[in-house]
Image (spheres, rainbow, N blue to C red):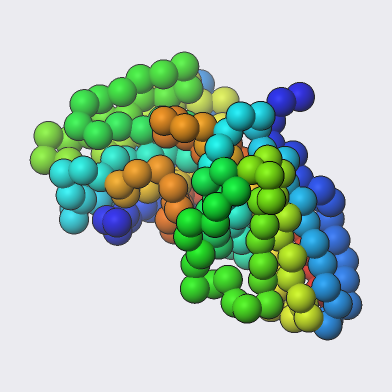
Amino acid sequence: DTGVSQDPRHKITKRGQNVTFRCDPISEHNRLYWYRQTLGQGPEFLTYFQNEAQLEKSRLLSDRFSAERPKGSFSTLEIQRTEQGDSAMYLCASRSRGGFEQYFGPGTRLTVT
Amino acid sequence: DAKTTQPTSMDCAEGRAANLPCNHSTISGNEYVYWYRQIHSQGPQYIIHGLKNNETNEMASLIITEDRKSSTLILPHATLRDTAVYYCIAQTGANNLFFGTGTRLTVIP
């Protein structure tokens, strides 16, 4: 399968713990996006990479959140000191240079207890 | 990016055409109209996009009014697998997409 993959698919953590999610984009897609989706809402943009450069961050991305894409391939999203309000689906997407469509992964569902 | 307005929900009989409207009255000349859909528990899926002209692909047709203030996504023969939330997005570029709450389409057997 050559689609966008995300790991893990589900994560349950206790409040205050740190969590890290991984996204593997479609090969040779140089743009990578992270979104967050809560129940009943559409996905909300968090941050965007072009190759290894993080070009844009939403105000939703508080200082407890950090994202990296060190070699311009896979990306990680880390949440430090998780809070119950961080419970959501975290979606990753990738896009090719010149392409219009974003291809989404299946998401990582985070539950903070 | 232009604000879009969509009905909260719609029903469509299986085998019939599903016509999903979207209002984007403040759209500017360089903003595209994108449609994505999200089937339950999956990531969103790109359907189609357009600027001025009507567009068709293997999934759907996009009809944009001449003044570009509204558009309609048409699924020509809806199946049960088309039950999903459909998002209409109007913006320049294709980066940080603003999804809104979309239209929940239910295809009825």
| Depth order, front residue of B1/B54 | B1
Image quarter where the C terminus of chain A lies is bottom right
Relative depth, front residue between B75 and A62: A62
Residue at x 18% of width, y 49% of height: B28
Count of numbered badges drawn on the protein: 0
Q: Where is the N terminus of chain A found, in terms of image quarters?
A: top right
Q: Is residue B57 visible?
A: yes
The quarter of the displayed image where residue A40 is located? bottom right
In front of the other: B18 or A6: A6
Q: Residue at x 84, y 51 (%)?
A: A8
Whether residue A43 can be seen here: no
Q: Is residue B41 left or right of residue B62?
A: right
| Residue at the top extreme, as displayed | B58
Residue B100 at what x, y percent from top left?
A: 44, 58
Which x, y percent locates residue A80? Answer: 76, 76
Residue B79 placement: quadrant: top right
Residue sitting at 20 percent across and 32 percent down?
A: B52
Residue furthest to the left in view is B67
On screen, residue B85 versus residue A98, left or right, reads: right
Q: Position of residue A87 (x, y in %)?
A: 73, 70
Q: Nearer the viewer, residue A23 or B73?
A: A23
